[in-house]
Amino acid sequence: MSNYSQNIWFNGEVIPFNEARIHILSHVIHYGTGVFEGIKCYNTPNGPAVFKLKEHMVRLHQSAENYKMSIPFSVEELCYGTIELIRSNSLNNCYLRPVAYYGYDTLGVHPKNCPVEVAIGTLDWGAYVGKEALSKGAKVTISPWKKYQSESFPASTKSSGTYLNSLLAVQDAKSKGFDEALLLNLDDTVAEGSGQNFFLIKNGIFHTNDKDANILMGITRETVLQLINDLGMEYKISNITKDDLFNADEAFFTGSASEVTPIRKIDEHTFSNGKAGKLTLKIQELYYNIVRGKEPKYESWLTYVN
Ligand SMILES: Cc1ncc(COP(=O)(O)O)c(C=O)c1O
């Protein structure tokens, strides 16, 4: 297994990778009753640092609360565990996957006394949408699967079971030769990618949607909004229609794993002459400089491992 790491943090302890096991009758396996995060650690001139660690662990707790799941570790304990794990695996760069889920007690849908278990894994995960997409732009298709609506699930919650919606969308996109899917809402406004938030740029103004569009309120989305502001540029937050989409000058995805991924094509429509857009690349460059510890102004977003 290429992503093998030496250790896993499991219920408060760092244990060998192969010993991190759960029972086959765990509630999460049958009903997807888990919540999770995706975080990145980057090498910087001062050693490895985790980007927006606390924000992710706070969101993990919020996601759990949506399902009345009580995580038996505080945000601080989870942050500390993450650092301990990275150190024990001697990693400089990695993707981190905290997950909290209902373990084994009952198979009734109501989890009753199922214990809440928590784990953190590290993976060597490169460019999520693909290395080429980061420089040249991704090819995206509008999914025939609509985004699930907040009336059915709390859409701004990162919960395991709801990713079956994302799975259908990305499987469809890949089977048609695209890199990623863009999911629309029932009213045909844009929601988000299978694992990314969406931005477009028109006449130099950035445009993204928010909670009303059934999106996960991405931590990278929030970061990028601040960077747009800090660079003296403008953004607007409102629903995005298909017309907005196809009239845009540039488009891109944001996400902790996808970082800032330019989009060069959505179905038959190309953006910026089929290349990554200039403003998108400007934001991407600044983002990379920040996460790699080269922008002192944004140091407070980094948690150093050593
Ligand atoms: C469905 C979905 N939307 C948006 C995002 C982006 O969120 P963030 O920037 O917090 O990683 C993700 C990634 O976690 C996601 O899975």
Image: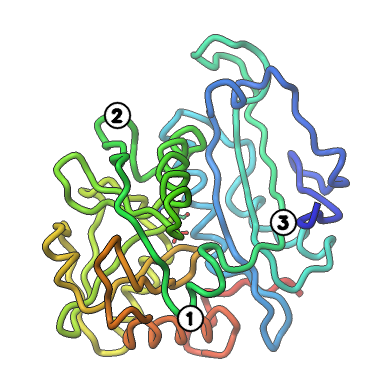
Q: Is 249 situated left or right of 224 in this image?
A: left
Rendered image: mark on residue 143: none
User: How crowded is the residue under tag 1: few (<14 C-alpha within 10 Å), some, or many (20+)?
Assistant: some
Q: Which residue is mark 1?
A: 135
Q: Which residue is mark 3?
A: 122
Mark positioned earlier in the residue sequence (3 or 1) = 3
- Element under label 3? strand
Rendered image: mark on residue 152: 2
Q: How far, Cα to Cα, is label 2 from label 1?
A: 37 Å
Q: How far, Cα to Cα, is label 3 from label 1?
A: 25 Å
Q: Quadrant of residue 94?
A: bottom right
Q: Amino acid at mark 2?
A: Ser
Query: How is the rendered protein coloured?
Result: rainbow
- Element under label 1? helix
* Residue drawn at point x = 14 percent, y = 71 percent: 247
Report whether the residue tagged 3 is closer than 8 Å to ligand 1.
no
Figure label count = 3
Where is 186 relative to 245, above or below? above
Q: Quadrant of residue 254?
A: bottom left
Q: Amino acid at mark 3?
A: Thr
Q: Quadrant of residue 66?
A: top left
